[in-house]
């Protein structure tokens, strides 16, 4: 995990399997990732439930008790398998990208002149229950997609009309006024969804608040100020 923090390292972190450098990197990631925070809490609850389980109770009557499952070895094998799958996916993606570049060069040569307009990559999907809003004062507009989960709410988010440089974060606001940070980001110059930089900001996050508790989402500027409020 030394080159990139992965959500799949939550289990290894909970069992103390990460090396010192990886552990520090994951803890830095954990502070801004509601999804990993929720999963880590779930693992803590599961560990408490398993700690009181008598291994003899899990065996059928009349059969000899099997040795306890090697949990740590299992997690290590799972991490290794995840890393192998990611390497295969990266290699396949690189090969596909190379093929697309070759096709693009051929098409441009055949067309001549402008060679056609380059295609923008598809925007990250907004999934689940959708809500949109815009703020005439700041020029910002955004969309959230919400999926109710047992551990809280999964959030997909798109933001446009924001000029940089800025540091912002997305907060979920509950009926009681409680706030939960879904995620944070930097807005470089010139910004997102503005002239010269038309691509929107796309983000995935999570909150421990259930869907029924949430009344709105707010894009908050670090240091003070609200760019956008999206009622839900």
Image: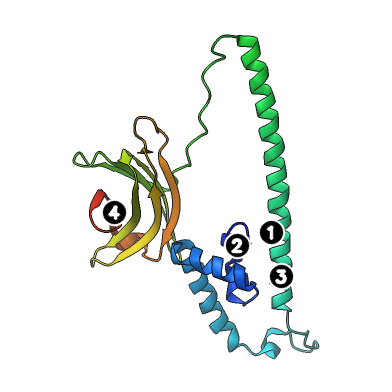
What residue appears at the point 31 percent right and 63 percent down from the top-left corner? 213
Percent across and percent down for residue 126 are 43, 44
Q: CA distance from mark 4 to mark 2?
A: 30 Å
Depth check, mark 4 against mark 2: the one in front is 4
Identify the mark nearer the N-term, 2 or 3. 2
The residue beneath circle 3 is 76
Q: Dot 3: what SS?
A: helix
Percent across and percent down for residue 84 are 73, 55
Image quarter where the N terminus lies is: bottom right
Check contact, mark 2 vs mark 3: CB within 8 A.
no
Q: Give the camera-side residue of 73 and 4.
A: 4
Percent across and percent down for residue 27 are 51, 69
Check contact, mark 1 vs mark 2: CB within 8 A.
yes
Check contact, mark 4 vs mark 2: CB within 8 A.
no
What residue appears at the point 37 percent right and 40 percent down from the top-left corner? 189
Q: CA distance from mark 4 to mark 1?
A: 36 Å
Identify the mark nearer the N-term, 1 or 2. 2
For residue 160, side relative to residue 3 (left or right): left
Q: Where on the picture, by quarter, is residue 171?
A: bottom left
Mark 4 surroundings within 10 Å by alpha-carbon count, few (fewer than 14), some (14 through 19), many (20 or more): some
Percent across and percent down for residue 75 are 69, 71
Say above or below: 26 vs 71. above
Say above or below: 22 vs 147. below
For residue 221, which numbered disc appears in the image?
A: 4
Q: Where on the picture, by quarter, is residue 175?
A: bottom left
Depth check, mark 4 against mark 1: the one in front is 4
Identify the mark nearer the N-term, 4 or 1. 1
The residue beneath circle 1 is 82
For residue 88, side relative to residue 8 (left or right): right
Q: Dot 4: what SS?
A: strand
| Residue lying farthest to the right in this orientation | 64
For residue 8, which numbered disc appears in the image?
A: 2
């Amino acid at each position: 995990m030394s080159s990139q923090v992965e959500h799949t390292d939550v289990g290894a972190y909970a069992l103390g399997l990460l090396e010192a450098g990886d552990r520090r990197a994951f803890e830095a990631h954990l502070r801004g990732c509601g999804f990993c925070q929720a999963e880590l809490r779930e693992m803590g609850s599961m560990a408490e439930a398993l700690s009181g389980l008598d291994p003899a109770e899990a065996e059928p009557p009349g059969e000899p008790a099997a040795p306890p499952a090697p949990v740590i070895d299992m997690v290590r094998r799972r991490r290794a398998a995840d890393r192998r799958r990611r390497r295969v996916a990266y290699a396949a993606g690189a090969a596909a990208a190379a093929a697309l570049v070759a096709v693009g060069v051929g098409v441009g040569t055949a067309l001549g002149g402008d060679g056609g307009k380059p295609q923008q990559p598809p925007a990250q999907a907004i999934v689940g229950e959708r809500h949109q809003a815009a703020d005439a004062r700041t020029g910002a507009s955004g969309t959230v997609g919400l999926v109710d989960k047992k551990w809280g709410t999964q959030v997909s988010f798109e933001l446009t009309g924001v000029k940089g440089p800025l540091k912002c974060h997305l907060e979920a606001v509950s009926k009681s006024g409680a706030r939960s940070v879904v995620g944070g980001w930097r807005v470089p110059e010139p910004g997102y969804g503005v002239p010269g930089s038309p691509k929107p900001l796309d983000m995935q996050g999570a909150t421990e608040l259930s869907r029924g508790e949430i009344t709105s989402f707010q894009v908050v500027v670090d240091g003070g100020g609200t760019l956008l409020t999206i009622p839900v």
